[in-house]
Image: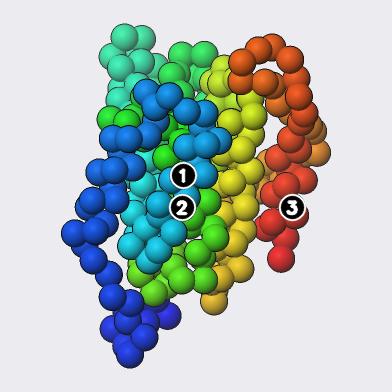
C-alpha cells in the first residue's frame, strides 16, 4: 500500500500528536451551534486552522468519529424500536438508504446530536473541505481507503436525511452535501486504485432531480442542488 510505504519510507511526514490534540480540542470547543458566528464563517475559519498535515490528520479523525457516532446512534434507535414494537431494522453502514426508506418517520437524524458535539454544518463541513483540498497528501499521513469509506457514509446519511429524515435543505445543508461530494471526488482522483462506489451513491447518480435549497433564516427558496448531476460530475472519472 502506497500510504504505508510513504509512512515507513524516506518521504515520511513529521507529525506532532500533541499539536493534533490541541487542534482537536480547539475545533471541538470553540465552534458549533453555540458559536455566535454563521456556519459559513465557522467553516472558513476552521479550514484555515486545519490547513497543515497535522490539521489533515485531525480532519480525518473528525470525519471518522462522526461516522462512527452516527452508526452507534442508529443502532441504538433500531434496538429501541425493536424493544417497543418488535420490529427488526437492519443497520448497514455501507448503505443506510434501505433503513431510512423503511423506518424514516420513526428515526431521528443522528448528525444534529452527536456525543462529540461536532456539528455537520461547522466542524464536519470544514473537515471534509480539508480532506478534499489536501487529498494528494492523505497517503503520507493515513490510509485513505477507510477515510473515503467514512466520507461516503456521511454523504449517505446526509442525503437520506433530506429524503426520509425531515432534514431541512438550506444553504448550510447544501454546502455540506456539495463539500462531501467534492471531497470524495478529490480523494478518488488521488488514489492509485480507487474502490467501487457504494450502493447509495450509485443509486443517487441515476437520478436527475433538483432539490430546492432554502434560506437558513426563512422559508424562501434561494436555489437548488442536483445531487445526481454533481455526483456524476465528480465520480465518473
Q: On screen, 84 above or below 60?
A: above
Q: Element at badge 2?
A: helix
Determine the residue positioned at 76% across, 38% down. Answer: 226
Q: Element at badge 1?
A: helix
Local packing at callout 3 (Cα closer than 10 Å; few below 14, some 14-19, many 20+) is some
Q: Tell me which numbered mark, 3 or 1, is placed earlier along the sequence.
A: 1
Mark 3 or 1, which is nearer the eye? 1
Residue 206 lies in quadrant: top right
Residue 189 lies in quadrant: bottom right
Local packing at callout 2 (Cα closer than 10 Å; few below 14, some 14-19, many 20+) is few
Give the numbered dot on residue 45: 1
Real-space CA distance between mark 3 and mark 1, rounded to the nearest whole angstrom: 30 Å
Residue 187 is situated, as x and y percent measured from the top left of the image, at 54, 63
Extreme residue toward the bottom, this view: 10
Q: Tell me: 140 left or right of 221.
A: left
Give the numbered dot on residue 48: 2
Mark 3 or 2, which is nearer the eye? 2
Q: Tell me: 218 left or right of 208.
A: left
Q: Tell me: 197 left or right of 86.
A: right
Give the numbered dot on residue 232: 3
Kindly indicate whether the residue at mark 1 contacts the one at mark 2 (C-beta within 8 angstroms): yes
Q: Nearer the viewer, residue 113 or 152?
A: 113
Real-space CA distance between mark 3 and mark 2, rounded to the nearest whole angstrom: 29 Å
Residue 180 in sight in this render: yes
Amino acid at each position: 500500500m502506497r500510504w504505508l510505504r510513504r509512512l515507513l519510507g524516506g518521504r515520511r511526514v513529521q507529525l506532532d500528536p500533541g499539536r493534533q490534540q490541541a487542534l482537536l480540542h480547539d475545533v471541538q470547543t470553540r465552534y458549533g451551534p453555540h458559536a455566535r458566528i454563521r456556519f459559513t464563517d465557522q467553516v472558513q475559519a476552521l479550514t484555515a486552522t486545519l490547513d497543515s498535515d497535522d490539521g489533515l490528520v485531525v480532519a480525518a479523525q473528525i470525519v471518522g468519529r462522526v461516522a462512527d457516532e452516527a452508526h452507534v446512534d442508529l443502532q441504538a434507535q433500531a434496538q429501541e424500536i425493536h424493544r417497543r414494537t418488535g420490529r427488526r431494522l437492519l443497520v448497514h453502514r455501507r448503505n443506510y438508504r434501505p433503513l431510512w426508506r423503511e423506518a424514516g418517520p420513526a428515526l431521528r437524524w443522528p448528525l444534529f446530536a452527536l456525543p462529540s458535539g461536532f456539528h455537520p454544518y461547522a466542524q464536519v463541513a470544514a473537515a471534509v473541505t480539508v480532506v478534499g483540498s489536501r487529498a494528494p497528501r492523505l497517503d503520507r499521513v493515513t490510509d485513505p481507503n477507510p477515510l473515503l469509506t467514512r466520507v461516503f457514509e456521511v454523504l449517505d446519511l446526509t442525503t437520506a436525511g433530506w429524503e426520509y429524515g425531515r432534514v431541512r435543505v438550506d444553504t448550510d445543508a447544501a454546502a455540506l452535501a456539495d463539500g462531501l461530494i467534492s471531497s470524495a471526488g478529490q480523494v478518488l482522483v488521488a488514489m492509485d486504485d480507487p474502490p467501487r462506489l457504494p450502493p447509495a451513491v450509485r443509486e443517487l447518480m441515476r437520478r436527475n432531480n433538483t432539490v430546492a435549497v432554502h434560506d437558513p433564516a426563512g422559508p424562501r427558496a434561494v436555489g437548488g442542488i442536483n445531487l445526481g448531476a454533481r455526483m456524476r460530475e465528480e465520480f465518473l472519472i
